[in-house]
Amino acid sequence: MNAPTYRDVLRQKKYPLLLSSNLVNRFGDAVDTLAFSWLVYAFTGEGMWAAIVFAVNKIPSVFFLPLSGAIVEKYEKKKVILLCDAIRCALVAALMGILLAGKLSLPILFSFTFLISTAEAFRMPASNSFITQLPGKELLDRSLVLNVIVSTAAEIAGTAAGGFVISRLGVSAALLIDVISFVISIGLMLLIRHREEVSAPLRQSNSLQIFKDGLFYMKNSPVLVHVIVVALLANAAMAPLDSLQTAAVVEVFHREADFLSLLNIALSVGMFVGGVIYPALRTQIRDHFLYLLSFLYLGVLYGSLAWFGHFGDRGPAFSLLLVLAYLLYGFAAGFLATGLGIELMENTEQRYMARTTTLFSSVSSLATPVFSAAAGVLAGWMNLPALFLFCSVLIACGLLLCLPRMRKSAEKPAK
C-alpha cells in the first residue's frame, strides 16, 4: 500500500475546510498582532507601556490554560472554537470602533488585551483537539504537517500585509482586516459537518481533579521538570526583545511599521526552518548542545542590538544586517520550541498528553509576563541599547553557570 500523500489529505471533505479556516484565521491574527503592537507604542510613545501591555497579553495563558484544557475536554470542540472566535471578533470590532471614535485609553488597551487573550486561551486546546478528529488515523501525520505549513505561510503573509496596511492606511484598517478574517473563518467552520461525541463520564468529571492529576504527573517526572525549566529560561531570555520590539524599531533602528513587518517575517521564516531541520540535527548533536547554541546566539543578539544603537550608517546594509539577525533569532527560537516539544512528547504517556501540554504551555509562559513587565520598568529609566546590553550580560552569566552541567551530559549519546 502506498504511503499517504498531501493530495490524499486535500481530497478529504472536511479537512480542507478546516485548513482554509485556519489559514484565514492565522492571516488575520498576524495582521492584528502587528497592528496591536504598533498601536500600543504609537498611543503611549513609550517602550515601557508597550512591554507592560505585552506582559498583560500573556497573563491569561499562565492562569487559564491549565484549567481551560480540562474544561474544553467536556464540550464539543467545534462549538468552543466558534464561540471563542465570535468573542474575539466582537472585541476587535469594538476596539476598532473605540479607536475611530478617539476614545482610546490605557485602561481600555489593558482590558481588551486581557479579554482577547483569555478567549485565545480557551480556543487553543479546542483547536489542537479538533484538528486531530477530522483526518483518518493514517492521514494524521500528513494533516498536521500540512496545517503547520499553511499556518506559517499565512502568518508570514499576514505579517507582510500588516506592515503595508499600517504604514499606508493606519491601524484601524489592519483591525478591520482582522474582523473580516474572523467572519470568513467562522463561516468556513460552520460548513464543516462534524458531530463529536463527548462521553457522559467526561462531561461529569471534575476539571480541577483532572488538572491536579496532570500536575502531580509532571512534578514526579524529572525529565518533564527539566523541559519546563529550560522553557522558562528560554521565555525569560526572549521576553525583553519581544515586548520591546516595536520600541526598538522606532527608537534604536529608526524605522517604520513596514520594517517591523519585515523583521517579523524573517523571524517566522527562521522559526519554521529551524523547526524543520531540528529533528535531523538532533540525531547528530545532543539536545543540550543545541539549546546551548540557541541561548548563546540570544546573548550575542542582545549585545549586537546594543551596538546597533550606536551604528552611524543606517542604509540598506544596516537593514540587511538586522533582517539576518532576526532570521537567525528565528532559528534559535525554532530550535528551542521544537526540541522542547519533542522531549515533552517523547516523555509523556498518551493518557496525560492533553493535560501535560496545556500545563507545559502555562507554566513555561509564566516567565514571559514577569520578564516583559520587568523589561518595561527598566526601559522607563534606561535607554534600550543599555537594556539590551544588560540582557546580554545576564545570558552570558547564565551560560557560564550551565557549563558544568553541559560537561556532565557530554558523555551521553546523541538521540
Image: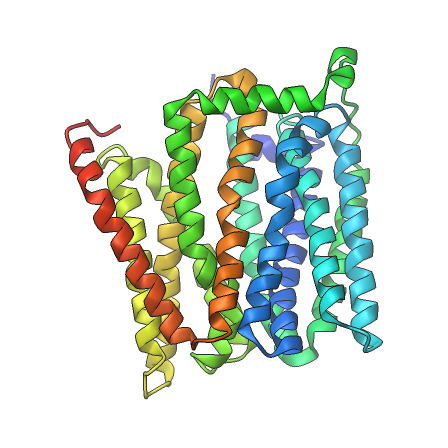
Quadrant occupied by the C terminus: top left
Q: Position of residue 238 (x, y in %)?
A: 43, 55
In this rendered view, identify the residue nearer to me: 69 or 93. Answer: 69
How many numbered marks, from 0 up? 0
Q: Position of residue 355 (x, y in %)?
A: 58, 26
Look at the picture and state if 305 lies above or below 159: below
Locate residue 39 relative to residue 406 in the image: left or right: right
Q: Quadrant of residue 106?
A: bottom right
Look at the picture and state if 176 lies above or below 41: above
In this rendered view, identify the residue nearer to me: 96 or 178. Answer: 96
In this rendered view, identify the residue nearer to me: 78 or 227. Answer: 227
Seen at 38% across and 75% down, the residue is 385
Seen at 47% across and 74% down, the residue is 248
Q: Is residue 139 visible?
A: no
Q: Position of residue 88 (x, y in %)?
A: 76, 51
Seen at 20% across and 38% down, the residue is 406
Which residue is situated farthest in the bottom direction here? 312
Locate residue 211 relative to residue 338 in the image: left or right: right
Q: Position of residue 306 (x, y in %)?
A: 34, 73
Q: Quadrant of residue 94?
A: bottom right
Q: Is residue 183 visible?
A: yes
